């Protein structure tokens, strides 16, 4: 695109709600829409390439992919619980490998217990300090002042340096680790999440064969204070390098300003809508590519992983939303997923949960749901009918 086209694309216009519609009304309509979409009974995606491994097939060739978890030794019970559910609903049939990443050595107890529940090969990868720790360009005073401001505003984890390290690592470093270079696709798994629907097809081959870049289950708004200057830094980059911006980017989803206008304002024009990255299935070659890499260098130079608390979820989402074709992003409607307090709850015979189909979260956080915007602004009706 040209710089002028980028400028125009990044200004929101023509929202779906008439100007002046009260927030409660917008949230109510959005949740109604959410439940309507999810009340449709579904099974597997239709009209897409699907590969099913047959029982007893001993020559099945896996896609180039790994399950992936950055996790602490202290989270052993939580990660074992997540793995058990992912194995029972899907991986028992495929036995994809699992890569565990940590900034410290894993204990023998950790290794023993995860190896008991993983059906595929297990790899461990320790993050070099030079990658994990705060980089040299971070100014100590700016960092201190930034943290003080976030803490005064009661932003979670603001003063926890390891959380900043984790966000930066997950944003732009994990796919460069020695042990991950050999893989193309990953499925990120966190401790204490739930998978509650059976999936029979090969999810990684689904990504590969349908040429998808990024898959998600839940989409949310973010705390604007944590990303006050992410969007400005990004727009400056895009105006300097408009050739990286994809003409079919998810511009409206990124710039929406009706449901939580104070977020869009606080983040300088970015809705704060993102894919919730504790679940993600994606192609690391996208991050390794020129557009994302150059942009990430600009983010590192700006220092917002420490001066603010830029999260890997908004960073991945803004990167995908600007530099990739939005038709290469897939909402995995069929994967039942819960990370407290949010979930993706499909209507399918393959699911077992006490929640009704379309359950999202407790009512006090309904306004945090951005999935309706993704569906309205980024999916075609054709895509919506593929389940
Ligand atoms: P939240 O979901 O934003 O509340 O953050 P979590 O505490 O769940 O952290 C996100 C992911 O990063 C989880 O998989 C954690 O296990 C992992 N994580 C967070 N901090 C650290 C850390 O200091 N070391 C390691 N090894 N993993 C971490
Ligand atoms: Mn978490």
Image (cartoon, rainbow, N blue to C red):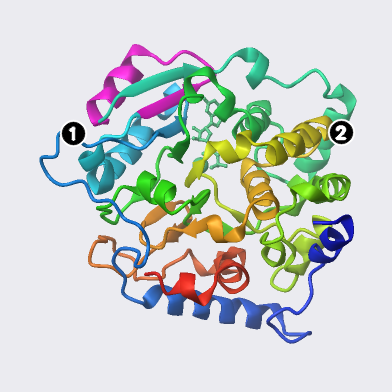
Q: Is residue 167 placed above or below 30 in the rendered structure? A: above
Give coordinates of residue 80: x percent, y percent: 32, 33
Over which residues does the magenta segment extend?
98-119
In the rendered image, which quarter is residue 310 located in? top right
Q: Residue at x 50, y 80 (%)?
A: 32
Relative to 82, 119 lies left or right: left
Q: Residues within 10 Å of mark 2 (few under 14, many from 20)?
A: few
**Helix, strand or loop under label 2:** helix
Compared across the picture, whether 52 is left or right of 103 comes to: left
Task: For the N terminus, give its image quadrant.
Answer: bottom right
Label 2 CB-ligand 1 distance < 8 A = no
Residue at the location (56% across, 61% down)?
327
- Camera sees residue 228: no
SS label for mark 1 = loop
Q: Position of residue 140 (x, y in %)?
A: 85, 22
Please name the residue that numbered disc 1 is placed on: 59
Residue 102 is inside the magenta segment: yes
Number of numbered discs overlaid on the protein picture: 2
Q: Are the residues at dot 1 and dot 2 in contact (C-beta closer than 8 Å)?
A: no
- Disc nearest the viewer among 1 and 2: 1
Q: Which numbered dot is residue 299?
A: none
Quarter occupied by residue 25: bottom right
**265 left or right of 218 in image:** right
Label 1 crowd (10 A; few <14 / some 14-19 / many >=20): few
Identify the disc placed on residue 145: 2
Choose the circle earlier in sequence order: 1 or 2: 1
């Amino acid at each position: 695109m040209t710089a002028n086209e980028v400028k125009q694309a990044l200004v929101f216009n023509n929202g779906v709600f008439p100007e002046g519609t009260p927030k409660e009304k917008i949230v109510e309509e959005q949740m109604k829409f959410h439940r309507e979409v999810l009340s449709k009974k579904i099974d597997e995606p239709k009209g897409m390439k699907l590969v099913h491994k047959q029982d007893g097939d001993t020559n099945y060739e896996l896609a180039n992919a790994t399950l992936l978890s950055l996790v602490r030794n202290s989270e052993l019970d939580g990660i074992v619980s997540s793995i058990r559910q992912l194995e029972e609903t899907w991986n028992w049939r495929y036995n994809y490998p699992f890569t565990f990443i940590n900034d410290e050595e894993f204990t023998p107890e950790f290794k023993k217990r995860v190896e008991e529940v993983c059906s595929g090969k297990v790899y461990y990868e320790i993050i070099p300090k030079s990658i994990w720790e705060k980089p040299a360009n971070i100014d100590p005073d700016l960092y201190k002042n930034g943290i003080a401001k976030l803490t005064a505003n009661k932003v979670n984890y603001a003063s926890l340096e390891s959380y900043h390290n984790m966000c930066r690592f997950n944003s732009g470093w994990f796919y460069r680790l020695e042990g991950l270079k050999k893989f193309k696709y990953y499925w990120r798994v966190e401790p204490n999440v739930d998978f509650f629907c059976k999936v029979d097809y090969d999810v990684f081959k689904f990504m590969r064969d349908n040429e998808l870049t990024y898959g998600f289950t839940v989409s949310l708004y973010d705390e604007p204070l944590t990303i006050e200057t992410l969007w400005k830094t990004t727009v400056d980059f895009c105006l300097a390098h408009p050739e990286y911006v994809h003409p079919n980017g998810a511009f409206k989803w990124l710039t929406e300003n009706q449901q939580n206008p104070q977020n869009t304002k606080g983040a300088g024009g970015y809705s704060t809508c993102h894919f919730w990255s504790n679940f993600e299935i994606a192609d690391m070659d996208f991050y390794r590519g020129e557009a994302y890499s150059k942009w990430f260098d600009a983010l590192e130079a700006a220092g917002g992983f420490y001066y603010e608390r830029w999260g890997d979820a908004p960073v991945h989402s803004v990167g995908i939303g600007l530099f990739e074709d939005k038709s290469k992003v897939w909402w995995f409607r069929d994967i039942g997923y819960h990370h407290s307090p949010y979930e993706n709850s499909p209507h399918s015979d393959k699911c077992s949960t006490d929640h009704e189909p379309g359950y999202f979260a407790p009512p006090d956080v309904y306004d945090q749901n951005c999935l309706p915007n993704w569906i309205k602004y980024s999916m075609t009706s054709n895509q919506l009918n593929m389940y």
